[in-house]
Image (cartoon, helix red, strand yellow):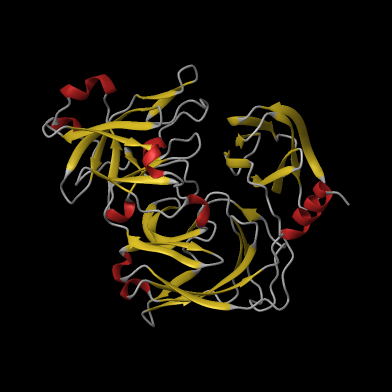
Amino acid sequence: MNKIQTLILAIGCSCISFSANAQVVSDVVSIQPGYTNQVFYNMNSGELSNITHTNWDIAFQLRGFAASILINSKNNVKLWKANKDISQWSTMMTSDTTGIVNNPAYELVNSDTSWDFGAFNSTNDATNPFDLGWGTYDFATHIISGDSVYFIKIGATDIRKIKIESLASGTYNFRFANLNGSNEIVAALSKSAFQGKFFAYYSLVNNVSIDREPIYNSWDLTFCQYLAISPVTYKVTGVLSNDSVFVEKAYPVDVNTASAGSGPLKGEINAIGYDWKTYDFNSNGWLISDSLVYFVSDRQNAVWKMAFTGFDGASTGNFYFDKSPAVASGLIENSSIKTFGLYPNPAHDNVRMMLQMEQTGNTVISIIDVKGSVAYSISATLRSGLQSVDLDISELVSGLYQIVVRQGNEIQTSRLLVD
């Protein structure tokens, strides 16, 4: 059996194989009384960071092509799109907020299923792949030019105007001001200042950027308070997943004997979410579903069994859960080929893969299903350096796949969920 056959066999087994004697670890994560903090968590090593969740207002995506810009709903930041062209910025007045601010028809919120659609992106034209909501991408110049103006509320009564002017040469350029045009601040945020991170954060109140995340590839889950959309928006406390972390929900099951593979894997960031608990007004406490298990496929190709056992609510902000490891695939990937993400993921018809190659050479890209069969394969000469490869996945059935990139004896893998 050669190297690629061994790799495919390991991939085919890794998604559903569990150790019968896996040690169960009881863990607790606290986001502090009043849910003031946010925890980034690694399924293997546990809590990576526990940081305040109230010191930022907007966040800029650093990876991929979505150029997502979030607002901090935990901090009660609110955003509305102004009924103005970006060229009218200097002539805008306080009276322009009439009928818009505090009007639900204009309010914009972050997606609760994908990191790629922050509140600033939510007005994009879905039929135009170059429309990012806050601006439009120019394929010739590789610059996103802003075309929208917004009102942003960052305190009980502090409402300002803001526009994202561009994303050019790795730098977000934006400006914000009081509604009457006073105290205008021209700001810039460079991606290069936040190497290896998913988002960079910014406080409009203090006019300062904030580095508050662990390395992108190091965390699997984040425990926090966020805004849910179902179908009305309201603030909830729960668990969101990192990009390319997949979750299978098993319910109703025997928590002690449940195994993976009976349900679909989901790539939405709220696949765990908040509704594993309910508030009981009779006992004034939180009840946990006693027949519910999550199987978390983490960023390191390992699968974990996770069952919540308790939740204290706002009094402590404590989450209690048990976890046990699956048998990981055991793949050792050579670092001479690096993958920087699949966009979008989950995907339906097409997916773009970012690759960093050390050398130019013939490269085979294969998409492997969970049974180890090759569902799709292409061969091309890829040059050294950073580049993108577009893959047509329109013929693939829904499910979880591994993408294997092979150049000579060097191999790198990524996971793709086809919806």
Residue 313 percent across, percent down from the top left: 37, 73
- Residue extending farthest to the bottom is 283
Residue 384 percent across, percent down from the top left: 62, 30
Front residue of this view, candidates 313 and 185 = 185
Front residue of this view, candidates 303 and 339 = 339
Specify whether residue 85 is in view.
no
- Give me the residue at 44% from left, 47% from top: 197
Among the 4 quarters of the image, the one containing residue 60: top left
Q: How many marks?
A: 0
Specify whether residue 114 is in view.
yes
Tell me if 21 is positioned left or right of 179 in this view: right
Quadrant that contains the C terminus = top right
Residue 241 percent across, percent down from the top left: 51, 56
- Give me the residue at 30% from left, 64% from top: 36
Tell me if 11 is positioned left or right of 212 in this view: right
Residue 391 percent across, percent down from the top left: 68, 32
For residue 41, above or below residue 125: below
